[in-house]
Image (cartoon, rainbow, N blue to C red):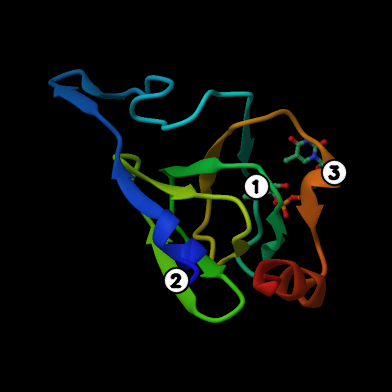
Amino acid sequence: MQTSKLEQCAVLKVPTVNDARGNLSFLNELDHVPFAIGRVYFLWGVPDDSVRGGHAHKNLQQFLIAASGALDVVLRDGVTEQTVRLDKPTEGLLIGSMVWRELENFSPNTVLLVIASAPYDESDYLRDFDDFVSATLAP
Ligand code: T46
């Protein structure tokens, strides 16, 4: 039986050093982020009624951290669905390829930091859910 793509998604700790001056969190490539880093981008100024995402990636892997604020990430593999609340900068969500994601319920002033395995490439996106289901369930 095919393994669910959702099992390849995981909430991982972001190593953090705390002292009286505040907190410092860091990520080492191929260690805390389990892939080679091709791009970093961040979402900010997101209205609280906004829904982002609504697509899957053929190959891209990503690691999402709510550096500030909070949001829900809804993950779907075409069969099952799981919602992960990101609300602390000390943990991040690893999303593998061929996982549909929707980002919603942003709290005010959320900054979502995204570390991606490759530069932006529109041809890597599946933006139609039926096409995604067909592709992911194909033998
Ligand atoms: C994802 C979620 C978490 C670029 O020019 N470069 C980039 O690196 C990215 C990510 C986007 N863009 C352009 C493409 C669109 O014209 O920015 C515009 C908005 O992109 P999109 O509608 O894909 O944004 P989101 O927030 O729905 O999705 C993004 C990522 O695209 C996606 O990979 O997983 O954030």
Q: Position of residue 128 (x, y in %)?
A: 82, 69
Judge by depth and name the residue closer to the eye, 2 or 133.
2
Tell which tag, 2 or 3, sits nearer the viewer. Answer: 3
32 vs 51: above or below? above
Work out how far the residue at label 1 is from the one at label 3, CA to CA, in angstroms: 23 Å
Say which element carries label 3: helix
Asked whether 28 or 18 is in front, the reply is 28
Q: Is residue 78 visible?
A: yes
Quarter of the image for residue 47 reads bottom right
Is ligand 1 less than 8 Å from the beta carbon at label 3? yes
Badge 1 or badge 3: first in the primary sequence: 1
Disc 2 marks a residue whose amino acid type is Thr
Q: Are marks 1 and 3 in contact (CB under 8 Å)?
A: no
Camera-side residue: 74 or 118? 118
Read off the residue under disc 1. Answer: 45
| Residue farthest left in this picture | 20
Give the quarter of the image for residue 70: bottom left
Q: Secondary structure at mark 1?
A: loop
Q: Which residue is drawn at the image coordinates 67% and 70% (left, top)?
A: 139
Q: Identity of the amino acid at label 3?
A: Glu
Give the mark count. 3
Q: Is residue 71 left or right of residue 134?
A: left
Could you say which is closer to the camera, residue 1 or residue 48?
Answer: 1
The spot of residue 46 in percent (x, y) is 65, 53
Q: In the rendered image, which residue does mark 3 sit on?
A: 122
Q: Provide the residue designation for mark 2.
A: 83
The residue positioned 78% from the left and 46% from the top of the image is: 124
Give the CA distance from mark 2 to mark 3.
25 Å
Q: Is residue 29 left or right of residue 45?
A: left
